Every structure is written in C-alpha cells, then in structure tokens.
Amino acid sequence: MEDFSTLEDTLGYSFDKKQLIIEALTHKSSKKPYNNERLEFLGDAVLDLVVGEYLFKKFEDKDEGTLSKIRAALVSEDGFTKLAKAINLGEYLYLSSAEENNRGRSKKSLLSNAFEALLGAVYLEAGLDTTKEIVTKMLERNYPQIDLNTLCKDYKTTLQEITQALYGVTPTYTMLGSSGPDHDKVFEVAIILNDKQISVAKGKSKKEAQQEAAQIALGVIKAEK
C-alpha cells in the first residue's frame, strides 16, 4: 500500500482506515470499483458548515450578506484548490493515463474535488471536531488576512487582463448611485465593455461594488465564450 505519511503529516491527521484516504484520492477516470465522488459530496456539505461556523465566530461585527460573500470566496473551486496545493494533494491523486497526460494533477476541478473528498473522509472517520480543527488551521495558515476585499482583490485585475486579451479593450466602471443613510450606504456600480453594460452590483463601499461587478462580469464572459 502506498505511503501517505507525508500527506497525513501535512494535513495534520493520520487515517486508521487507509482505504478511506485511497478512495478520497481516486478520480473516476482511474476506472477503479470506487472513486471520490461520494466523499466529495459529503465533504462539500461539511466544509460549508465548518467554514460558515468559523466565520460566524471570527467576525461578530459582520452581517449575513458579508459573511455569505466571504464564505463563497473560501468555499469555492479556487479556494479549495489553494488549500489542496498547500498540501501538495495533486501528487497523490489516482488518475487514468489520459488524465495524467492532460495535466490532471494541476486541474482546479480535480484538486478542489479531491480536497472536499479528503475532508469528507476525515469527517467520516474522526468526526466534526477534528475536521474543524484541521480546516481552521489550514485557513489561518493560508489566509493571513480574511476579508472581502482581500479575497476578491484579483477580480478586477483578472477582468482587465481577460478583456484586453479577448477584445483589446479594458472595462469601464460607472457609478450608478448610492442609497441609505451616511453610516450605512450601499453603492451601485455597472461595468461597461465595448459600449455595453455587462454587469451591475452593489456593495457597502465603491471598491466592494466594483469587485462584485467584476466577478459577475467574469462569469458573463465565461458563459459567452
């Protein structure tokens, strides 16, 4: 049986049932009698709960909308890929030769799914408290600062790079207005690309609204490609 001790040391948990970790690392392309899809399903639900509770306790001053956005950034393909790479998870995946040749070990979707499956396996064997301890340590180790602007800071840059590459132009951010009292204003921003409005979003600050609009715009462009 393969030695998972380095991965387990990095994760901070050693499995008693090695078949669980094997299953968590097995992609369906390997054509084995089992794969990690069921554990991924479980891990997705567990991580949603664990990260939600972590944020709820950490940010007592944040409202539901802000907490939801921060959780969405962490509990995402990009978020889980970041954590998967931190423990070199790609090195341990069981893949088909075709998937291996297709750079499967570095694919976001495979890494994210395997990470969910791995934490689903931890939950099955060790329970919620151990899973929370592992996830909390990983979040704090890999995210020195957790806030909406920090987590979303790349959306505007990414959008600018993509629009420049695809269309030869950069987007324009237009302030549509603001509402609410001075101490609790909500700003609304639109993104214009090639004289067309492609997204609109609101935020507690102009920067937050711009980041939100940029994220939506990236989804629109991806859907049209």
Image (tube, rainbow, N blue to C red):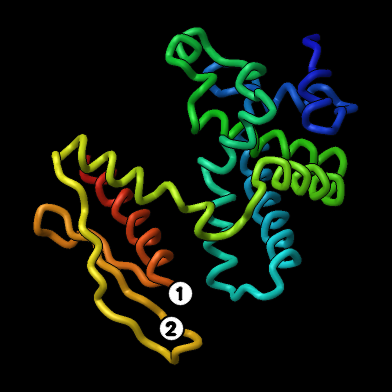
Coordinates of residue 8 in the picture (x, y in percent): 81, 25
Give the alpha-carbon distance from disc 2 to disc 1, as whole Å. Answer: 6 Å
- Viewport quadrant of the C terminus: top left
Left or right of 100: which side holds 195? left
Amino acid on which the number 1 mark rests in the picture: Lys
Question: Residue 204 shows which numbered tag?
Answer: 1
Coordinates of residue 120 in the picture (x, y in percent): 72, 40
Coordinates of residue 129 in the picture (x, y in percent): 86, 51
Among the two numbered marks 2 and 1 on one chain, the one whose residue lies closer to the N terminus: 2
Check the image and report above or below for 208 versus 38.
Answer: below
Q: Residue furthest bottom?
A: 181
Neighbour tally class for label 2: few under 14, some 14-19, many 20 plus, Cα within 10 Å: some
Check the image and report above or below for 161 versus 105.
Answer: below
Amino acid on which the number 2 mark rests in the picture: Lys
Check the image and report above or below for 179 versus 81.
Answer: below
Question: Residue 185 shows which numbered tag?
Answer: 2
Which residue is located at x 33 percent, y 61 percent?
213
